[in-house]
Amino acid sequence: MNVLVFTPTPTHPPIQGNRQRVFDMCRAMQSMGADITLFHYATEGVSPSATRQMREAWGDLELIFPSGFTHRRSFVDCFGIDDWFDDRILATAEKLVESKSFDVCLVNYAWYSKLFEVLPREIVRVIDAHDVFGGRAQYFADIGLDPEWFHTSIEQESLGLNRSDFVLAIQDEEAKILRARTEAPVHSVGFLDTDQFLPPRKRAPAERLVVGYIGSGNPFNVASMRVFAEDMKLRPELHARMEVRVAGKVCAAFERLSHPFTLVGVVDSITDFYRSVDVVINPMRGGTGLKIKSQEALSFGKPFVASADAMTGIHSMHPGHRLDDNAAILDRLLELAADPQMLAAESEISRATFTAHRKAQAQAFLVFWSNVVDAVNARRSQTVAR
Amino acid sequence: MSPNSASRTARTARPPLVIFSPYPPSANGIADYVGELMPHHRAEFDVTLVIADDAAMPEEGNDVPRILLASEFRKHRGFFENAPKLYHVGNNPDHCYMLDLLARDPGIVVLHDYNLNYMHEVATQGWKQRDGYWSALELEYGVLGSEAVRQRFERRDRGQFATYELPLNGDVLEAATGVIVHSRYVQYKVAARVPRKPVWYVPHHLSSAVYHYGQITKAEARRQLGLAENEIIITAPGFITYAKRVPMLLAALSTLRARLPSFRLVLAGERCPDQYDVDSDIANAGLKNYATCTGYLDEEQFFLHLAACDVVANLRHPTGGEMSGTLIRALGMGLPAIVFDIGPMGELPHSVVRKVPWDGDTHAALTAALYELILDKTRREELGARAAAYTRETHAIDKIAGRYSEIIRSGGEYVRPAEIEPVRENFPHPKVLADRIRNMSVGPQPTGSLRPDGRLWWQCAKAPLGQSGRRALILAAHSRQTAEFFAGAFGWRSEDITAMTVEDFVGPTLRNAQGDPIPQGAFTFALVVTGVEMAEISAATLLRRLNAALRRGGNLTFELSCGLDHEYDESPLADSRMVDRLTEAGFAEAARVPRRDGIFAEAVPVSPNESEARRYTCFTARKASSVSYWRFMIEFDGTPQHFGGRIA
């Protein structure tokens, strides 16, 4: 089966959540027997080594650059669904479908769905939504932030989604929202990352609890960490009991954070960072999309303390994974600092949560893929009948 | 040159011969060497000369053979499949293009320099491929090479880097079907490096130009060069480098200055200011008014300087194993020469050159030799006459060309033993592997177990596909099931696989399932799947025996797992130190396998033997060296202390 995958983000190196997502979906389809042709519209630029790696991974790579293209703005409040679509994509897609017979075309992000216009009808069309972009401006405004990146209206998003035969959502909550916006079947498939469980950190008997947080510089992470630090200040009894190591690009937003915080910055090895902490936190408030950092912490099997918002898209019954506010998170950390024996049990819970989540996502992908294969077979038989 | 015209020429009676070499007008001594031999080769063979794509194109003429650029040769290599090939390899950038070609189209190598370190450096570092240079040294010398190159990069001081101790010629010698050298010194070294391979000694030929320039009188040459008629001239030909021991020559002449008649030292070659500051040494020796540096000389100017001089000083230490073509020319011109009594130059008869021993008293011996030859005209003339007679007889070009013909005609019969062939494996793409595993389970005759030990080695496709002449060693707790899965998924014949548990492999006696001893270097691939919880002596034995079991260049995939109850960072095989462990055990290119490279595991119906509640890490490496080293780790007062020793 030949699959054309359009992506505006490269799959290599997989240093961001959206790149990992595209990589995982391509690799999963490839493992199921699909031949991938990756059509990359290099909005972020692409290095020669990344190009070589993508060619090695996918075999066929078509690369174009957005030379001279500027985004249009069809509406006052938001972008139209095709405002970010460069017509050079159409020309290249046309050439590709002329040179090779595709069965499936997967487009990453609904605002590139105009690409479907040049495809023969027998090709099954899939949109990987990545997130909800319709009404996003209002969502940001509700929490006092300006919308970043692409955002559109619900109607415009529906227009894009309805061009497809299948829509992929990244988590159940978003799948519910998208189902209300499109007639196409919506499948929820999260990240397909595998476990990389770590044993607990070796610690001296009277040592302080080492708490870790790693996050990108997105506004939700920055705002959440700022509030968490303020709330921590109000709890001086915790300061002697723990150290909070903050890593990743989120550090750039802070000139300094007072004791017990340590700003680590961008780390060379994520594994080493997780290895160096006893417990990981994600005190996120709000935010859209899947909370990739929560899933990552669980994939390392570390004890995890998080807000309910931070666990959106990841099923867990554990109370420590769904805390209401920072006060509850700090109380939980104090409990762990007072009784380190609990850390082993917390690790086990994190591992079990991740394993169940991974199994559910893998199963969801298999169901999605079998539906796509059925659709391809149905199209083929229709073509033969004609 | 089109292949069609090549085809027409090849139909002539002369057998084909492909020569890879720089060629005039390239400013390269080996180019001149090959240019001089070419008429003789062409009289015997239908010669095709392959030059680098960026080389200066030889001018058309009677002595120029058919020329192909390297890229043209690659395109039409099938046409030359059965033609004998002759590679002239020297330690400079003009030969880099041959590395790939030699690996693909082996032939006889004429090794002009034993040391090829600089050529590799240029071929990799010169293109900003620092890792390539690192990897070449590591592959050749194991941990020693990687340590040396690490220090080199850290210190950024090329002079301190021991390139003479690391000649980096293994890939060239191993790819060669036979080797031609210009000295016994290099012949013995090459024979030791690649035993069972023919190594022919062919003396460096004497250039025919000697007979022409030999007619020019000393007075005429000095007149043309503007040199004084009545001075004694001592000439040191070639690049002005420290290894030519110019400081020693300056010191000797400085010592003698007051006792000598009027003299002049001519350094007849190009300065190498990045390596050696000759002007400052001349000034320090007080010889500013006695020394001349000529700069680059073309052939005519070079011979004029030889014709004009009284004594030639051809000193080299350390030696890269090269025979000096300029020395042979000087001797052919009938010049008395002083050389060190080491390396290729030390092989010349005492009656032909004035030899100075290289020992603690070299300065005094060199001073005495210079004094003797400068003051004694008769002795100079006698030594020069013997040198001319010897070289015109022993190094005569028609004799040397005849020797080449014999070797080329016989060289094709050499068959490379399988065990010293470079190991080139094909690792499957994850997609191909997933398809193969699915076929194992649904085919008409299921090919066996789908319950291997370990996860990452197969999910990330870190085992090569089976092919003829390859043998695999599988070490795993469920060795039979793992080997069956390996055979089916990676296309190996079961008779090419030896499977056993790690415990059996590190046991007191090592035998295969049939009770036969396992020979050294028998395997091209080894897979180990084991837990990190292993006694230190067992871990040391495991790595040493893996090294011994694999052929040089053979691949190793090593998957480790550990429980999640506590950190295993002090285990002998802790994943944090595995790269160092493998490197010290004689493996190169040791690297952790990124788990993201793996297939979507649910796409295939495999049920691994281990439970999921473990941590898995996987490493790959290639055997680079038979030197296997292990740092024993002993705890003193709870603090790990490391000290090492080579295991016998």
Image (cartoon, coloured by chain):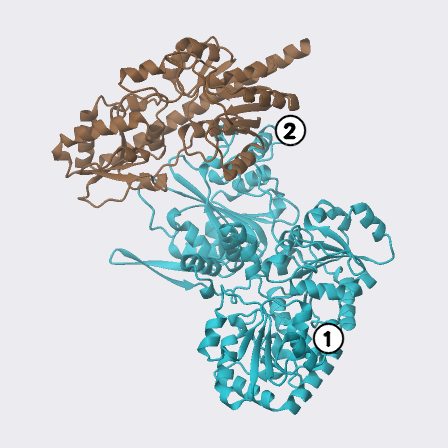
Judging by the rendered image, the residue that carries numbered circle 1 is: B213
* Dot 1: element: helix
> Chain drawn cyan, letter?
B
Q: Is residue B588 left or right of residue B24?
A: left
Q: Residue at x 52, y 75 (%)?
A: B245
Q: Residue at x 74, y 46 (%)?
A: B76
Using the rendered image of the protein, determine whether residue B496 is visible from the camera's viewpoint: yes
A181 relative to A88, above or below: above
Q: Tell which circle, 2 or 1, labels the residue nearer the N-terminal end.
A: 1
Q: Is residue A276 left or right of residue B530?
A: left
* Dot 2: element: loop
Number of residues whose C-alpha sits closer than 10 Å to that of mark 1, classed few (under 14), some (14–19) or many (20 or more): some
Q: Chain of mark 1?
A: B
Q: Residue at x 70, y 73 (%)?
A: B203
Under mark 1, the amino acid is Tyr
Under mark 2, the amino acid is Pro
> Chain drawn brown, letter?
A
Q: Chain of mark 2?
A: B
A96 relative to B108, above or below: above
Judging by the rendered image, the residue that carries numbered circle 2 is: B444
Q: Which is in the foreground here, disc 2 or disc 1?
A: 1
Q: Alpha-carbon distance for marks 2 and 1?
A: 81 Å
